[in-house]
Amino acid sequence: MRVAIAGAGAVGRSIALELTGYGHKVLLIERDASRIDPEQVPDAEWVHADACELSVLEEIEVQRCPVVIAATGDDKVNLVVSLLSKTEFGVGRVVARINDPTNEWLFNEAWGVDIAVSTPRVLAALVEEAVTVGDLVRIMRFRSGETNLVEITLGSDHPLVGSAVRSVQLPRDTALVTILRGDRVIVPVPDEPLEADDELLFVANESAEDDLRALMAQRRRG
């Protein structure tokens, strides 16, 4: 897959290294000449240019990229890159980095952003996920914020422990996508029994989260 990344700072380079390691073709676009260092990501194609310029995106044929990642340290730049990629070139998936959490409300479909990644929010979610049992933890937002990846850890006193996955009566617009059990990643087939300390990952519409939280907050009686 061909992926364009705007911003060759520490974040952009790290993403590029991961993606090239998976065999993807990566274009790293950077306007600061001092950051152009092909030895840092030797398998990427480096472009010394301003990704906010329409002519630059035309020249690199960004429309041929199924994914564009706006990963600069400037939220204004990331929003412009996202908007141009989506509206002018019809890029299928635009991922944008949020540097200042107060700007999070801008990173939505209106600005061409499909997935917005806020480092403070991700870190906070990971902390919550590590210490919280029985409550819903939001890991990531998809699209315009209407659908989220959420996690719930089953306590030992939950009535679903010992039951099969088929016993989980999920709210509408909610799907159990995987079960993390120790170092195992388990596909949630209907007959799979649930165990204490299982981490359940759901994709859920935001409107269904309260019902999902209520379902998973149950405890065994007496």
Image (cartoon, grey):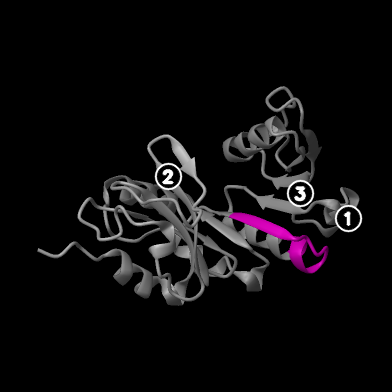
Q: Earlier in the sequence, mark 2 or mark 3?
A: 3
| Labelled disc at residue 50 | 3
Say if mark 2 contacts mark 3, CB within 8 Å: no
Badge 2 element: strand
Quarter of the image for the N terminus: give it: top right
Location of residue 85 in the rendering, given as x and y in whole percent from the top left corner: 76, 60
* Residue 94: quadrant of the picture: bottom right
Is 192 covered by the magenta stretch? no
* Residue 102: quadrant of the picture: bottom left
Q: Residues within 10 Å of mark 1 (few under 14, many from 20)?
A: few
> Could you tell me the amino acid type at mark 1?
Glu
Location of residue 48 in the rendering, given as x and y in whole percent from the top left corner: 79, 39
> Could you tell me the amino acid type at mark 2?
Leu
- C-alpha gap between disc 3 and disc 1: 12 Å
Residue drawn at x 38%, y 51% is 193
| Labelled disc at residue 58 | 1
Does residue 34 appear in the picture of this structure? Answer: no
Location of residue 114 in the rendering, given as x and y in whole percent from the top left corner: 63, 63
For mark 2, what is the residue?
180
